[in-house]
Amino acid sequence: MCGIVGYIGESQAAPILLDGLSKLEYRGYDSAGIAVFDGGQINMSKAKGRLKVLSELTHDGATLPGTLGIGHTRWATHGAPSDINSHPHFNESKSIAVVHNGIIENYIKIKKMLEAKGYKFVSDTDTEVVVHLLDYYYKGNALEAITKVMHRVEGSYALGILFAEEPDKLYAVRKDSPLIVGKSENGNVIASDVPAVLKYTRDVYFIDNEEIAIISKEDLKFYNVYEEEIQKESVKIEWDVEAAEKGGYEHFMLKEMHEQPKAVADTLNPRLKDGKIVIDELNMTEEEINAVKKIMIVACGSAYHTGVTAKYVLEGLARIPVEVDVASEFRYRNPILEEGTLVIIISQSGETADSLAALRMAKEMGSKVLAIVNVVGSSIAREADSVLYTWAGPEIAVATTKAYSAQLIAHYLLALKFAEVRGTVSEDELKDYIEDLKRIPEQIELLLGNREKIQKFANRYVAAKDVFFIGRGIDYAISLEGSLKLKEISYIHSEAYAAGELKHGTISLIEDGTLVVALVTQEELYKKTISNIVEVKTRGAFVLAVTNAGNTEIEKASDYSIYIPKTNKYFTNSLAVIPLQLFSYYISIGRGCDVDKPRNLAKSVTVE
Ligand code: AGP
C-alpha cells in the first residue's frame, strides 16, 4: 500500500505535494519522491527514507519549481527500498513520469516484452513497466496510450501521470487501489486517500474501477476504459484529518481488520497463475523441495501462532515433520538442526531481535532459511536465503490483524506447493484447495459484517477477570491468537489451552461465570471438544463456541455460538480469528484502553 498525490493549479506544486504526502505516510514510508513540470521539462527528486529526507533534499520543494506535479510515499512490494526503486518513475526520454499504488501482477511478462523491444529498466519495481508501456503506446494521445496500458496490465493500480508534451494536464487512473480527485479554488488535486486533500477541499470525486481522470487547472473530465466521457458527482467529506487517516474508522486496528480481505487477496492472487500455485520467490527447485526432511518454524507472538497453525497444515498436506518454537527459546537452547532441515522465520516487521538472532544462528548452523515477512527490505528479509512476502501493507496498530491473516495465506500456499511437488495431494484435491483459498477474502468480509452482534456480546465481558480459550489441533492454534489479542489490547488475563489438557490441572480455575471461548472448527474433533465444553460447563463456565456454519449441534452444549462460513479444515483459522479479533477490540474499547497503542507494548520488539 503506498500513497500517491498530484496537483495542477496556480501555486507552486512541490510544497503542496510534500504536504499531501505527509498526510499519507501511514500508507507507506520507506521512500518518497516528487516530479514537477517546470514549463520546459519534468524534474524529479526521490530518496530512500522517510518523507523528511525528501523535504530536506528539495528544500521543502523549492528546488522543483512548477505548478504541475505528482508525488509518492512508498511501501515496497517489488524491489527493496532504495533511491532508484522509489517513485516517480521516468521513461527513458524523461517525457513521462508515473507514480503508482498497487501491484502489477504480470509485470515480469511485460518487462520481458519491452526489453526485447530495446527498453532499458533501471529499477527492480513492477511499476516501471507502466511508464515504459505508456512510452510504447504514446503517439501524441495520452488517453489512448493510457487505455491501451489498462488493457495490457493485470493487477491493482492507482496512477498519477505527467506527459511533458501535455503540460496543462494531470492524468489519474484507477483499478482496485483507491484514488480521489479534489476540486478547489487553488487548483485541483489527486490522492490515494482523503487526508491528503482536506486542507484544500472537501469536494471530492471518488474514482471508480477502470476510470481515468483528466485534470486541468480549470476543469475535470472523466472517462471509462473505452475512452468514452462519463459524468461523476462529487461527494462532500465531513471527516477531520485524523479520522480520515483511519479511513473513517475509529482506530487503525478496526481499519486494518477491514483491510484483511484485501491483504489476503493481495498475498494470494499474484501466486495463483492458471489454476496453479506459483511461488517464484521461494528459490527452491523441485529437487530441493523433495529433499526437505524437516521444517523448523521460529517466530514470536502472533507470528509464532501462525507457525503453530502452519505445523498442522504442512504436516497434514505435505507430510513433512514440523517443529515450531518461539525465537527467544530457540536461540538459547542449543537446538539440533539436522541436514535437510528448512528453517522458516515469520515476522511482520522483519526487525524482531529474537527472530533475527534465530535466523543468523540457523544460517551459521548451515540450514537454508526462508523468511515470511511483511516489510520489504527489512533485516530478516535481507538476511534470509529467500523471502515469501506478505502484501498486507503497513500495519500501524500494535496488535496485528491483517499481517497475521496474510501470514496464514503464505503458509497455506507453501504447504500446497510442497504437497504438489511431493505428490501428497492429487491434482483434483489441489484444485479444490485453491478454490477454497480464493473464497477466503469474501468470507472474511462476511464475518466482519457481524460486528454489531459481537460488540453486543463483548460488552457483557468488559469486566471479566479471566478468559480461557480452548481448542484441539488447529483450533488450539486459533486459541493462542484469540487469547493474545484479548490480553494485549484489553489487559484482561487470559489463557489458551489445548482442550484435552484442561483436566490436567487448569480446570481447577473454572468458576461460576468464567468465560470459556471454545474453538470447534475441526469436524473430526467436534465430539472431543464438546466433551471439554461439557466439562467446563459443569463447573459453572459460560461457553462461547466458534464453529462451522451448520454445526448447530453445538448449541446443545454451548451458551452462545458464532458460526464461520464453510471452508477447508486447514483454513478455518483465517475465518475463526475474525470474531476473536472483533471480540477483543470491543472489550478493549469498553474498558477505555488505547486500542492502537496498548500499554507496555511496541509494534516491533527490536531489543531482546
Ligand atoms: C501481535 O499482535 C503482537 N504485536 C506481537 O505478538 C507480534 O506479533 C510479535 O512481537 C512479533 O512481531 P513480528 O511479527 O514483527 O516479528
Image (cartoon, rainbow, N blue to C red):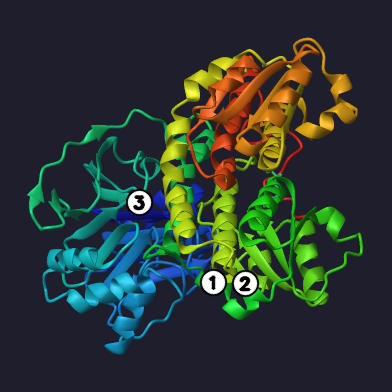
- Point out which mark residue 386 bears: 2
Q: How dense is the environment of label 3, judged by Cα within 10 Å: few (below 14), some, or many (20 and up)?
A: many
Helix or strand or loop: what does disc 1 sit on? helix
**Callout 3 amino acid:** Ser
Q: Are discs 2 and 1 less than 8 Å apart at CB?
A: yes
Q: Nearer the viewer, residue 285 or 608?
A: 285
* Image position of 607 with respect to 235: above or below: below
Q: Nearer the viewer, mark 1 or mark 3?
A: 1
Spatial CA span between label 2 and label 3: 28 Å
Q: In which quarter of the image is the C terminus?
A: bottom right
- Point out which mark residue 281 bears: 1
Whichever of labels 2 and 3 marks the residue nearer the N terminus, that label is 3
Whichever of labels 2 and 1 marks the residue nearer the N terminus, that label is 1
- Point out which mark residue 177 bears: 3
Please name the residue shown 56% across and 71% down the image. 421
Q: Nearer the viewer, mark 2 or mark 3?
A: 2
Residue 41 visible from this viewpoint: no
Helix or strand or loop: what does disc 3 sit on? loop
Q: Are discs 2 and 3 less than 8 Å apart at CB?
A: no
* Image position of 457 with respect to 204: above or below: above
Spatial CA span between label 1 and label 3: 24 Å
Whichever of labels 1 and 3 marks the residue nearer the N terminus, that label is 3
**Callout 1 amino acid:** Glu
Q: How dense is the environment of label 1, judged by Cα within 10 Å: few (below 14), some, or many (20 and up)?
A: few
Image coordinates for residue 604, horizontal then vertical, percent = 69, 50
Spatial CA span between label 2 and label 1: 7 Å
**Callout 2 amino acid:** Ser
Please name the residue shown 42% across and 58% down the image. 269
